[in-house]
Image (spheres, helix red, strand yellow):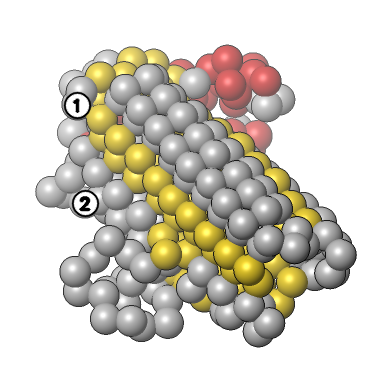
């Protein structure tokens, strides 16, 4: 435990791996678990039923595991679970879940989360995402793998963001953002697909061509969401390499709420 600064206040009931480093004046509560290789900067507060995995870099002035900003919350033992190898920059606030939903706020692995990001109760964040400064997620938001949120993006409660999607700076999302889509505006509007991001992730020309066809069906052919979904579902016929991408977007569209719809 020699990596814990003498001014840090760590509850003796907390489960802290011996390799964890904790900076000055940080406070760690009794129900916290922190895995090997994680570093925690100065002046952080980690409380609640919070589990943090391995090799995370948590910078100074973060609040992790505080109770949800929900008037209905009455002290239930809800959780915050953070995976491995995440970078969490300064002044982020991640709240625990609420009993009205899963009871868990969850962050996956290998995420790059910049300063002043807020994750409200019951949010689910996948893997390899990038949240730029001041991205703000209301409660119950779901974010898929490889998503990039531009600075000052604001996401309404219960909205879902599909894998490989991207928002521009100052975007405001009231509707679900399908996989691969790039959006911008207040409220956000679909502008294109994240083709450059897909190329950087090794998508083949055939897969990118399929994503272009998805964009055409969703946004260029004046189809209803049901009609567009049917059109997209046919793109994998005879093309096994694109089946996973088609399944991804068809599965996402199947879960769209009629009241919320998708970003158009």
Identify the residue at horizontal 58%, vertical 80% (top origin).
30
Determine whether 159 is above or below 97 in the image. Answer: above
- Would you call the spot at circle 2 few (<14 residues within 10 Å), some (14-19), or many (20 or more)? few
Q: Which residue is mark 2?
A: 257
Figure quadrant of the N terminus: bottom right
Disc marking residue 238: none
Element at label 1: loop
Report the disc number at residue 187.
1
Is any atom of residue 47 visible in this view?
Answer: yes
Is residue 253 visible in the rendered structure shown here?
A: no
Which of the pair 31/187 is nearer the observer? 31
Figure quadrant of residue 242: top right
Q: Quadrant of the C terminus?
A: top left
Q: Is residue 116 left or right of residue 209?
A: left
Image position of 67 (left or right of 50): left
Query: Which residue is found at the position 53% from the left and 46% from the top?
Result: 61
- The residue positioned 64% from the left and 19% from the top of the image is 199
């Amino acid at each position: 435990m020699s990596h814990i600064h003498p001014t840090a206040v760590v509850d003796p009931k907390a489960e802290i791996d011996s390799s964890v480093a904790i900076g000055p004046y940080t406070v760690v509560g009794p129900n916290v678990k922190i895995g090997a290789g994680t570093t925690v900067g100065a002046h952080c507060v980690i409380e609640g039923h919070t589990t943090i995995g391995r090799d995370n870099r948590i910078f100074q002035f973060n609040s992790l595991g505080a109770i949800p900003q929900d008037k209905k919350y009455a002290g239930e033992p809800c959780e915050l679970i953070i995976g491995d190898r995440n970078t969490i920059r300064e002044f982020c606030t991640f709240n625990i879940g609420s009993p009205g939903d899963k009871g868990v706020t969850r962050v996956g692995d290998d995420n790059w989360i910049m300063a002043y990001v807020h994750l409200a109760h019951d949010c689910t964040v996948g893997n390899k995402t990038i949240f730029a400064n001041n991205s703000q997620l209301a409660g119950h938001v779901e974010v898929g793998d490889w998503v990039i949120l531009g600075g000052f993006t604001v996401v309404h409660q219960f909205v879902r963001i599909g894998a490989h999607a991207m928002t521009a700076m100052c975007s405001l999302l009231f509707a679900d953002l399908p996989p691969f889509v790039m959006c911008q505006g207040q409220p956000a509007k679909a502008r294109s697909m994240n083709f450059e991001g897909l190329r950087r992730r090794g998508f083949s020309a055939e897969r990118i061509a399929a994503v272009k066809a998805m964009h055409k069906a969703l946004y260029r052919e004046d189809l209803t969401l049901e009609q567009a979904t049917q059109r997209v579902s046919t793109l994998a016929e005879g093309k096994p390499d694109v089946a996973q991408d088609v399944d991804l977007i068809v599965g996402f569209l199947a879960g769209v709420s009629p009241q919320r719809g998708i970003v158009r």
